[in-house]
Image (spheres, rainbow, N blue to C red):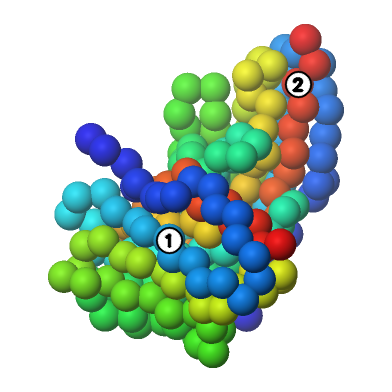
Amino acid sequence: KQEVTQIPAALSVPEGENLVLNCSFTDSAIYNLQWFRQDPGKGLTSLLLIQSSQREQTSGRLNASLDKSSGRSTLYIAASQPGDSATYLCAVKDDYKLSFGAGTTVTVRA
Amino acid sequence: EAGVVQSPRYKIIEKKQPVAFWCNPISGHNTLYWYLQNLGQGPELLIRYENEEAVDDSQLPKDRFSAERLKGVDSTLKIQPAELGDSAVYLCASSLVASGGELFFGEGSRLTVL
């Protein structure tokens, strides 16, 4: 069974600092890895999708890397803003379903 | 383009009562998922549909939960009877293809069982 871990569970940074969020998974036989953002009381918003054949994906200030062999992905958010405060979840797809980590709750202080 | 639509957004019921949640996926998305999310945790899969066929329902508590996806479009998730431990957010998601497709989620239906 796929196990997805996100450490730390929470972090707080001052505005402008770069964010580094980590995700690890136990089974490297995945189709893809997806990063989501979740605001309180809301659903999940897809941020980036990395296919298993890719090493990274970029969208604006966001960059996600994937190292399948070591079972790790990292989400970088450059020049953080208070609006980036949210919970970030990673999920890996294998056997046609997504397995989620518990998320990292980010607070960006103005 | 409309996203995944869920209703109701909030539901409060007494234990042993029935409850139903509805989901309309993104147009053209053949794969539909129902997930359950408890506070502070990541979502967990309940059931996956490919068109109208439930292809993975191994995590669905079939004694009280049921789901259907008529005509391969909208889906309904039902709980009868509800228990206190069912209080959670029920999320619906859809994707164009099952294997490498990106998942898109609805806003979720928050259930409180008293």
The residue lying at 57 percent from left, 64 percent from top is: B36
Chain name for mark 2? A
Name the residue tied to disc 2. Answer: A108
Question: Which class describes the residues within 10 Å of circle 1: few (<14), some (14-19), or many (20+)?
Answer: many
Q: Residue A89 vs residue B104: left or right?
A: right
Instruction: Measure the alpha-carbon separation of dots 1 and 2.
Output: 35 Å
The residue lying at 35 percent from left, 46 percent from top is: B5
Question: Which class describes the residues within 10 Å of circle 2: few (<14), some (14-19), or many (20+)?
Answer: some
Q: For mark 2, give the secondary structure.
A: strand
Splitting the image into 4 quarters, where does residue B97 fall? bottom left
In which quadrant will I find the C terminus of chain A?
top right
Instruction: Compare residues B11 and B65 and report the one nearer the observer.
Output: B11
In which quadrant will I find the N terminus of chain A?
bottom right
- Is the residue A104 above or below the residue A72 in the image? above
- Is the residue A62 above or below the residue B86 in the image? above
Contact? badges 1 and 2 (CB < 8 Å): no
In the image, residue A97 lies at what x, y percent?
46, 69
Q: Which mark is residue B21?
A: 1
Labels 1, 2: one chain: no
In the image, residue A45 lies at what x, y percent?
48, 40
Amino acid on which the number 1 mark rests in the picture: Phe
Q: Residue B96 vs residue B5: left or right?
A: left
Q: Which mark is residue B86?
A: none
In the image, residue B84 lies at what x, y percent?
71, 69
Chain name for mark 1? B
